Image: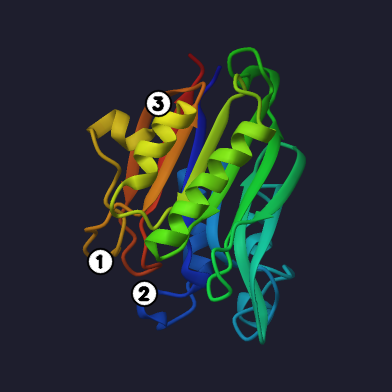
Amino acid sequence: MSALNIVTYNIHKGLSHFNRRIVLHELRERLRILDADIVFLQEVRGESDHYGKCNLDCRASSQYEFLADKIWLHQVYGKNSVYIGGHHGNAILSRYPILESGNKDVSAHRFENRGLLHCVIHLPEENKISGSQSLHCVCVHFGLFKRGRRMQFNALVDHIRKVIPADAPLIVAGDFNDWRNDANRLLTHELDLQEVFEVSTGKPARSFPAGMPLLRMDRIYVRGMLIKHSEAHVWRKISDHMALSAMLISP
């Protein structure tokens, strides 16, 4: 298998830290430099509004289409939070065809709408993982409160057990809001997942706030793959989170 490059990033609805300006053009350029095969995005606006088409200066109707333009030809979006002027949620951008997808509502209460965006990506022959060309990807953004997150962690475990074969290659990435590291213990023990930074450095990466990262909020979990490299990217003026990337290879 040639290396599979992945990135996860909470893009803060395309706004800079403290919401001072729109940064989508800068964000698109930074993501392209990373040359990822699959991109997991959180807090993506999925509809044109006052932060939408007129400010993007492009033909895209959504932020994820603008970011994907000509590079990641296959995209899926999970609408989670709806409000006056638009909606936002999670998105997955891929160089390779997406065979199927679905968005599962895991909201703990009506004040925080959250979802699990799950898709199956068809890898090319040279990128097969343990003989399989089907890669399951789940993009998550969990709640701010411990009780709700616990429910969402359990919903993720239940979904994976019911829907994804135990021997299927799997990536789960996103913003876990999990500074206490509860998800890490649950997912590694219950699902045999590995967190890429924990494997590389002993702990998940500090990724929030981007200006002075203290909390380990964002994660990349994998199953059925080896971690060749992982990196946290310090883009302080683009989002309040750091982007995380990993290079994966077949065992």
**Residue at (36%, 74%) from the top-left corner?**
17
Query: Can you tell which mark lies on residue 17?
Result: 2
Judged from the image, the secondary structure of the residue bearing numbered disc 1 is loop
| Near-viewer residue (133 or 124) | 133
Location of the N terminus by quadrant is top right
Q: Is residue 57 above or below residue 178?
A: below
Graded by Cα atoms within 10 Å as few (under 14), some (14 to 19) or many (20 or more), the crowding at tag 2 reads many
Query: Is disc 1 in contact with disc 3, using a CB cutoff of under 8 Å?
Result: no
Graded by Cα atoms within 10 Å as few (under 14), some (14 to 19) or many (20 or more), the crowding at tag 3 reads many
| Near-viewer residue (24 or 38) | 38
Under mark 3, the amino acid is Ile
Does label 1 or label 2 sit earlier along the sequence? 2
Q: Kindly report the distance in space between the C-alpha atoms of the residues bearing marks 2 and 3.
A: 30 Å
Residue 245 in the image: x percent, y percent? 42, 42
Task: Name the residue tied to disc 1.
Answer: 211
| Near-viewer residue (191 or 235) | 191
Query: Can you tell which mark lies on residue 4?
Result: none
Does label 2 or label 3 sit earlier along the sequence? 2
Q: Is residue 150 above or below residue 250?
A: below
Locate residue 98: give its quadrant.
top right
Query: Can you tell which mark lies on residue 227?
Result: 3
Does label 1 or label 3 sit earlier along the sequence? 1
Under mark 2, the amino acid is His
Under mark 1, the amino acid is Gly
Query: Is disc 1 in contact with disc 2, using a CB cutoff of under 8 Å?
Result: yes
Q: Is residue 35 visible?
A: no
